Image: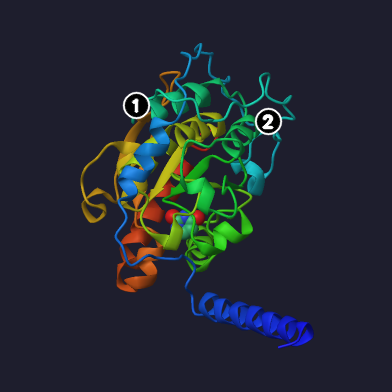
Amino acid sequence: MNEMTANHADSDARADLISYLDFHVEAGIDAALDERPHDRFAEAEAVQAAAPRAEPAPRREPPPRREAPPGEDAPLEFRRELPSRDPPPREPPRTYGNAAGAKPGEAADDARARAAQMQTLEELEALLRGFEGCTLRFTAKNLVFADGNPQARVMFVGEAPGADEDRIGKPFMGRSGQLLDRMMAAIGLDRTSAYISNVVPWRPPGNRNPTPQEISICRPFVERQIELANPDILVCLGAPATQTLTGTKDGILKARGRFYPYRLSDGREIRALATLHPAYLLRQPVQKRLAWRDFRMLKTALDGSAPGK
Ligand code: URA
C-alpha cells in the first residue's frame, strides 16, 4: 500500500467510526457502559476523599427580605424588584482541588461552608462553575443552574437535568419541561413569574438517578439558592426533591398534596408543596388529576399570600 492509499484508508476508517458513533447518539445512546460493573458510590467517595477540608465559614446575615414595589399592576404582582446587579464575589471561588485528607461526607460540609458565603445567586452560580467536588460535573456538558425569574414568589425544584437540559444549560427544557410549562400556565404562571431549579445541577450520565452522595454534596447549593431567591412558596417536583428538601421519607404518592414547613437560615419559615414530577406524569397521565389538585392548592396559597392581602 502506498502512502496515499494508506491515508485514504485512515480517513475512511475515521469517517466510519464517526458515523458509527453518530448512529448510536441518534439512537439515544449517550453514555458509554462497560461490561464490568462499576461501584459509582466508591468512585464518588474517592473524589470526596480527595477534596480539601473547608475552613469553617463565617456565618453571614441572610439578605433582607424584599418587599414588592408598590404600584405594580396585576400581571406583575407576582414579581419583585428587578434583579440586583451585585458585585462579583469578594473572594475568587475556591474549587475542590486535589489536597488529600477530607473524609467522605466532609465534602458536603465543605460545600455548605462555601455556599453559605455566597451573597447573591450570581456568586453561587460562579462558585458552582468552579466546583469540582461532585464527579457529575466531569461527565456533564453544562452546569444547569436555573431558569425563570429569581424574583418570583414561587420556586420549583426538580431532581436533576436530563439530556436536553444538559445541552442547553437550563432546567426543564425537554418534554417534562414542556409539560411543566403547561401545568404552570394552567394557574397563570410562566417562566417570568416562577423560578426553576434542580436539587442536582449536573446531568447524571445516561440519566441514571443521582446517588445519595451526589445529592448530599449538591444539597447545600440548592438550599443556599432557595435562601437567596427567597420565594414565598417552594414546589418540590417528585420524590427526590421532596425527600431532600422536606426531610420526609414518604413516597411521593403519600407526600404529595401537602405543605411542609421549610426553614431558612434566618429562621424564617416558608412552605414547601410536594407534587408529582412531570416526567412521572408523562408516564402516568392518569395521575395528572392529582397534580392538578396540587397546582390548585398552589394557586390558592399564592393568591392568599399575595402582597397586599
Ligand atoms: N427533570 C428534572 O428533574 N429536571 C430537569 O431539569 C429536567 C427533567
Residues marked 2 and 1 touching at CB (< 8 Å): no
Asked if residue 301 can be seen in this view, the reply is yes
Disc on res. 113:
none
- In this image, 70 relative to 132: left or right? right
SS state under label 2? loop
- In this image, 54 relative to 255: left or right? right
Sequence order check: which comes first, mark 2 or mark 1? 2
Residue 148 drawn at (x, y percent)? 61, 48
Q: Residue at x 41, y 29 (%)?
A: 107
Q: CA distance from mark 2 to mark 1?
A: 47 Å
- Classify mark 1 as within 8 Å of ligand 1 or not, answering yes or no: no
Q: Is residue 238 above or below residue 29?
A: above
Disc on res. 103:
1
Q: Residue at x 46, y 28 (%)?
A: 111
Q: Residues within 10 Å of mark 1 (few under 14, many from 20)?
A: some
Q: Quadrant of the N terminus?
A: bottom right
According to the image, label 2 marks what residue? 69
Residue 104 drawn at (x, y percent)? 34, 31
